[in-house]
Amino acid sequence: MFSKNWYDLIAIIYDGFTFWFYRKMRKDLIENLDIQQGDRVLIIACGTGQSFDLIEKKTGKQGEIIGIDNSEGMLRKARKRMEKHHWTNIKLIKADVRDLSRDFFIQRDINPEFDIVLAELAFSVIPSWKKVMQTSLQLLKQGGKTGILDWYRPKNDLLTRIANFLAQADITRNIPQYARQLMQDFKIIKTCFYGNIFIGTGTNKAKSP
Ligand SMILES: C[S@@+](CC[C@H](N)C(=O)[O-])C[C@H]1O[C@@H](n2cnc3c(N)ncnc32)[C@H](O)[C@@H]1O
């Protein structure tokens, strides 16, 4: 719809409009991921890094956080956040998350195995989201955990259309159902905003046939 990256256009106002709205949900999600000191965390479509502080507190300085996003505007905000807090264990990569693979990381001298993969407000926005979810599970260590915060509103009404426009998203995607297909133990921890937003976690244990 927009020739310029939408998130480059709105990066300057993104935190102002969203930070407090999602803050409690982000905290609840991170608490449920059981992140340990020294863990390596991959963030799919990390945006401005609104959860960096919550994750960094859990991983400590020995841990590592890798954030991927394709919007330079959003990443610029994320870099400012890192500089302000003197976080040196966060690495940001400007890339399309559809290009992620083990080789993507190996080519950049980054260990391609993560303890945690986090996707907040990502799968409702990125194209080929099912493929990206599959790939993200392949990047998890055995028993590693994935955390998802996202919208799911099957009704295509005015609220859906407004949310879809503002986020350039498709919030009718049944993300929980697909996550359950891929992860035998994927569960919704909580829903908020009248059931339209969920947080959920699962591990990369393969589903039994
Ligand atoms: C709604 S924002 C969420 C940002 C952040 N995860 C958060 O929770 O605040 C969606 C993000 O997805 C990013 N994005 C969309 N498509 C992408 C793609 N194909 N590859 C990488 N990032 C993408 C956008 O640049 C934007 O930062």
Image (cartoon, rainbow, N blue to C red):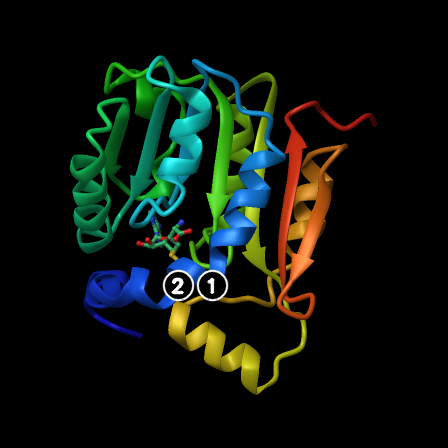
In which quadrant is the N terminus drawn? bottom left
The quarter holding residue 6 reads: bottom left
Q: Which sits in the foreground, 128 or 186?
A: 186
At label 2, which amino acid type do we have? Thr
Q: Tell me the distance, in whole angstroms, between the alpha carbons under discs 1 and 2.
A: 5 Å
At label 1, which amino acid type do we have? Phe
Which residue is rendered at x = 37% and y = 46% of the image? Answer: 45
Q: Determine the secondary structure under disc 1.
A: helix
Q: In x, y percent, where is residue 80?
A: 17, 44
Which residue is rendered at x = 76% and y = 33% of the image? Answer: 185
- The answer to whether residue 6 shows anywhere in this view is no
Ligand 1 is within 8 Å of the C-beta of the residue at disc 2: yes
Which residue is rendered at x = 26% and y = 48% of the image? Answer: 70
Give left or right: position of 196 versus 149: right
Q: In x, y percent, where is residue 56?
A: 38, 28
Above or below residue 136? Residue 72 is below
The tag on residue 78 is none
Give left or right: position of 130 versus 76: right
- The answer to whether residue 81 shows anywhere in this view is yes
Q: In x, y percent, where is residue 62?
A: 35, 12
Which residue does the numbered mark 2 point to in the structure image? 18
Which residue does the numbered mark 1 point to in the structure image? 21
Give left or right: position of 81 versus 104: left
Please tell me how crowded label 1 is: few (under 14), some (14-19), or many (20+) other residues with Cα within 10 Å.
few
The reply to whether the C-beta atoms of the residues labelled 1 and 2 are less than 8 Å apart is yes
Residue lying at the far right of the rendered structure: 209
Q: Determine the secondary structure under disc 2.
A: helix
In which quadrant is the C terminus drawn? top right
